[in-house]
Amino acid sequence: MVNPLRSAPDSRLQRIAGPCGIVLFGITGDLSRRKILPALYDLANRGLLPPSFTIIGVARKVDPSLPEKVEAAIREGANTPVTETTLKQLMSGLVVVNGQYNDVETYRSLGHTMDKMSAERGTNGNYAFYLAIPPELFPTVLGGIGTAGLCAEDDGWRRVVVEKPFGHDLESARELDDMVTKVFHQDAIFRIDHYLGKETVQNLMALRFANELYEPLWNSAHVDHVQITMAEDIGIGTRAGYYDGIGAARDVIQNHLLQLLALTAMEEPISFEPSALRIEKEKVLEATRFYGPVGESAVAGQYTSGWQGGEWVKGYKEEPGIPADSITDTYAALRLGIETRRWKGVPFYLRAGKRLGKRVTEIAVIFKRSAHVPFGNSDLSESGQNALVIRVQPDEGLTLKLGAKVPGTSMQVRDVTMDFAYGHAFTEDSPEAYERLILDALVGSAPLFPHQREVEASWKILDPILSFWETQGQPEPYAPG
Ligand code: BG6
């Protein structure tokens, strides 16, 4: 008998990108320096990029020292040890095209360079355009690529990787999508949400669908509520230009946290095919509701100056580049519900903020108390509810909190934890999220990239809250830490 599973690709195998290159708009920017360039090096170092891999950087200013800066970014940010031969090999495929983003000449010269590199290095005309640029430049750059015909797949594939924010509300997200789909077809668009590249986030699917233990409990009969938290101890640093007017809800709840909610609450997909996974995430996001009123079910906060970890830190409004009357939320928390049989009546609390006590991202599934215990209430005073805490970062892993008997002659129950830590259980190191996602884009594998419909469903949840906040004046101040 034919086993239908045999026809599915073996997901244990390492995928290796075929001949190709990346066209990096914003090569001199912060994201390229901190994440993209080191991730490309790590991929090369793991042998997952072809030796002929090409990086075409597009930069507005001529900077003869750019190759040194790229090298320095790699040395500083690489996750794997820097090997001189790999670095040299990667750097041999780096070329820079200079020009203004609104100048047709820039795209003409980019087209020539792409052809030239194809001929010289054998990229076979396969290129991914990576837009690591501020969103206001998207229309110009997409227009330039489209007008110059660089998206045409006459010889080789062409894809585009778009960084968030995917708009700033539902309407602008639709406008952005119209713009991108005028130039690239749907399957060629890769919207990066780097949380989906994190190992623990993918482990959430393994946990839920490779084990028998949790699924029977994963519903409103047993789950009391779910808390999804993304706390950061840092402030906004030098990102005033990006962050002000965006705030915590748009910056991370619309994408990272709602994606975590979708993966936690979705039904089992019929396969790991992009369409199958996206259908389930989309269904759950479509069923997610904010019931309001905003004043009771959502909170916006803004950090003030104060002591944090032995250091005096500036308040948000004193950060360089932030207007003194800014009403941007640096903390946001919401209570959501999901209108499905599985989740009816279970609150999902989402919260995210800067300048909080410590950096931690986790999903805590809190179970209901036992309907009956035969020991009498006083014996349970030191035990709480069972909880499964999925630690996304740092210290990736999970913790199960349960009640256990305290040794001794009396029957006393106290909370204990069972721990699984990635660092202890596996010797393999986790690739950085960007590494995984860039490789996926280069091999054309889309399961971990949100679809436009998910983006729109997320904005539908947030829009009423955001417009309420925008008319309500100041968010509540909170002290750092
Ligand atoms: C980004 C946000 O998407 O995620 C930043 O724009 C945030 O504001 C960052 O600091 C956090 O990422 P990570 O991987 O460090 O949790």
Image: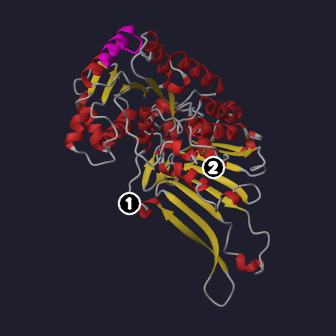
Colour mode of the rendering: secondary structure
Task: Answer few, some or many: residues within 10 Å of disc 2's Cα (few below 14, many 20 plus, some between 14 and 19).
Answer: many
Q: Is residue 101 magenta?
A: yes
Q: Is residue 68 above or below residue 98?
A: below
Q: Earlier in the sequence, mark 2 or mark 1?
A: 2
Q: Position of residue 11 (x, y in %)?
A: 48, 46
- What residue would you read off at disc 2? 264
Label 2 element class: helix
Foreground tag (2 vs 1): 1
Q: Position of residue 51 (x, y in %)?
A: 27, 34
Label 1 element class: loop
> Which residue occupies the extreme front position in the image?
1
The kind of residue on which mark 2 rests is Thr
- What residue would you read off at disc 1? 427
> Residue 368's image quarter?
bottom right
Q: Is residue 440 above or below residue 176?
A: below
Residue 377, which numbered label?
A: none
Question: Are the residues flagged by discs 2 and 1 in contact, CB closer than 8 Å?
Answer: no
Main secondary structure found in the magenta portion: helix
**For the magenta stretch, what is the residue range?**
98-115
Q: Could you say which is closer to the camera, residue 74 or residue 349?
A: 74
Q: Is residue 301 visible?
A: no
